[in-house]
Each structure stands twice: as C-alpha cells, then as structure tokens.
Image (cartoon, coloured by chain):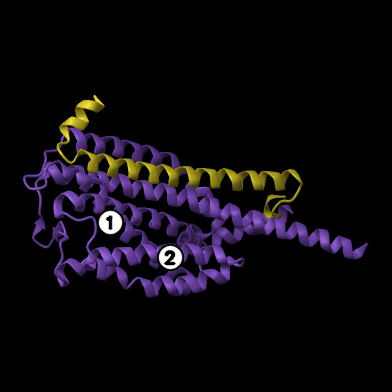
Chain colours: A purple, B yellow
Amino acid sequence: MKNSTQAQDQSIKKMNWFDRLAHPGQFLKWSKYLIIPLIIITIVLFALGLWYAFFNSPEDYQMGDTVRIMYVHVPNAWLSQFVYMAMAVSAIGTLVWRHPIADVSMKVAAPLGAGFTALALFTGSLWGRPTWGTYWEWDGRMTATLILLFMYLGLVALWRSFDDQLRAAKLIAVLTLVGAINIPIIKFSVDWWNTLHQPSIVSAKGLSMPASIYIPLFVMMFAFTFLFATLHIVGMRTEILRRRADALERKSLYNTGAKGEVK
Amino acid sequence: MIGNLVNSLGPHANFIIISYLGVALVITGLIIGTMLSSAKQKKRLANLEAKGIRRRSEK
C-alpha cells in the first residue's frame, strides 16, 4: 500500500502545473488555504460596501434614494452573467481537456448563478417601480435575463436527473456552451433595442457616474464576487467529497455483493 | 439608529429595504445550503472511514 501511495505521489509530481491544479486531490489540498482569507475579505468588503451604501453615498439627483438599490442590483446582475461565463469556460474544460474538476466547477456554479440571477430580477423589479413606474417590462434586457434564470434552473435540474455525473457533464457542457449565446444578448440588448433599462455604466467613454456613487458600487461588486468565489470553492470541495463518498459506497456494495456470491 | 436610517431613505424606503432584505435572505440561504451540504458529505466520508472503507491511497 505504501508503494501505491508513493507511486501516486510521483505521478502527481510529473504533472504540469495546470493538471496539478485540476487534480481533485490536489485541489482539495491547495484550496483549503484559500477559504479563510476569502471569507475575511468578503466580510470586510460587505461591511465597507454597506457602510458606503447607507451612510456615505449621496442620493441621485433623478432617482433619489432608490439609487441605493443599485448597490445590490448591479452586483447580482454582473454575477448572473459572470457565473454563466465561468460555467462556459468550465464546459470547455470538460469537453476539450476532460478535466474532472471542470465539471465539478460547472455543477456547483449553476445554483449559485440561479440565485444571483433571481436577485438581479427581484431587485431590478423593485428598483423599476419607483423609477419607471412599473415592476416589469418585456424588453430585451429583462426578458433575456429571465431566460438566463430558466437556463440556470434547467441546468440544475439536469444535473440532478443523472446518476452518472460524468456522462451528465458532457451533455450539460454542450448545453451550457449553446446557452452562452444569451450573454452577449443580455449585455448588448440595451444598445440594440429600445428599452426602459439604462445603458451600461461602463463604456469606452468611461464611467457614467460620480465617484461618490461608483466607489460604493464597485466595493459591493467586489464583495459579491468574493462571496461567489468563496461559495464556489467550498461547493467544489463538497462535490469532490460527495463523489468520493459515492465511489466508496459503490465499492463497499460491490465488495459485499462479491463476498455474498463466494459464500 | 435603524429608525433614523429608514426615515432618511425617503418616500421609497420600502422598496430599498425589501430589496436588501430579499438579497440578505437569498444569500443567507446560499451560505447555509453550502455549509449544510459540506457538513453532510464530511459526515458521510467519516462514517465510511469508521467502517474501514477508505480510498486505496489513504490506506
């Protein structure tokens, strides 16, 4: 047994840095050192961002205090698209390099993305009522974001409907890549079609708001992004452990069955 | 302090507060869900190890 462990250690040492990062066992080793720093950074950023949002930022000259909804709406809208792009990159990892960690990443990101997308729609709706006079408008940005939510929920349901997660990964990776077409549609919908939704806050011309508003916004965007990173890494570790436990249970059942046959 | 804050948020304070509460609720749900799931899998593996069922590399 000692020899098999040594052989495994040697085979890991032979891997390049990318393979080593993506090896589930190695991922469990290096990622555990990230969790506490990520939690601390996330808490500090949220504390700072909320303080800015409520106590150190002005009301907007047009929207008044409802501009404060932007500090939770925009980060969730950003993450709804960022998480999907992370899933699309993972899908490429699954299909091209067949890295086991890539489909773990894809699977864990889907429910998080669904949560952030639902929050983007929820907060956007609540922001729309006092500023536009309506909770909902079937325009390009909102409709495409609603479709994104349904896509996330569909992918979560697909993952749960397969017993064999490795087979599920290939199918879901293809679907994820096909669905990625929705991301540029969401991004550019405010430029392509008439809409109530305001245009992008970041453009080639720079930022379309004063520092007193974009500083709290960016602090909150970083806070939510670090929150996602923390939950994603913890979730990936959990998924690796789940697959290990599943494999061990199967092995245990197989051994029990084999012994039963011998008897 | 909270009363002062709510009063300072203007006529649409309800929309702002419900937005933040909704976000807090969903984020708390995601955090708790992630923690419970992690604890469950760790417990599963610990139970298997207690029965002597381990991965080859860990024997």
The chain to which mark 2 is attached is A
Residue type highlighted by circle 2: Ser
Q: Mark 1 vs mark 2: which is more N-terminal?
A: 1
* Callouts 1 and 2 on one subunit: yes
- Which residue is at the far left? A61
Image coords of residue A174 (percent x, y):
45, 75
Secondary structure, mark 1, is helix
Which quarter of the rendering shows the N terminus of chain A? bottom right
Label count reads 2
- Which residue is at the far top? B1
Identify the disc placed on residue A78.
1
Residue found at x 56% / y 55%: A240
Quarter of the rendering containing residue A162 = bottom right
Residue found at x 20% / y 51%: A129
Identify the disc placed on residue A90.
2
Distance Cα–Cα, label 1 vs label 2: 18 Å
Disc 2 crowd, CA 10 A, few/some/many (<14, 14-19, 20+) = many
- In this view, the residue in front, A234 or A80, is A80
Q: Is residue A84 visible?
A: yes
Image coords of residue A41 (percent x, y):
34, 39
Image coords of residue A134 (percent x, y):
19, 56
The mark closer to the camera, 1 or 2, is: 1
Identify the disc placed on residue A189.
none
Judged left or right of residue B59, residue A114 is left
The chain to which mark 1 is attached is A
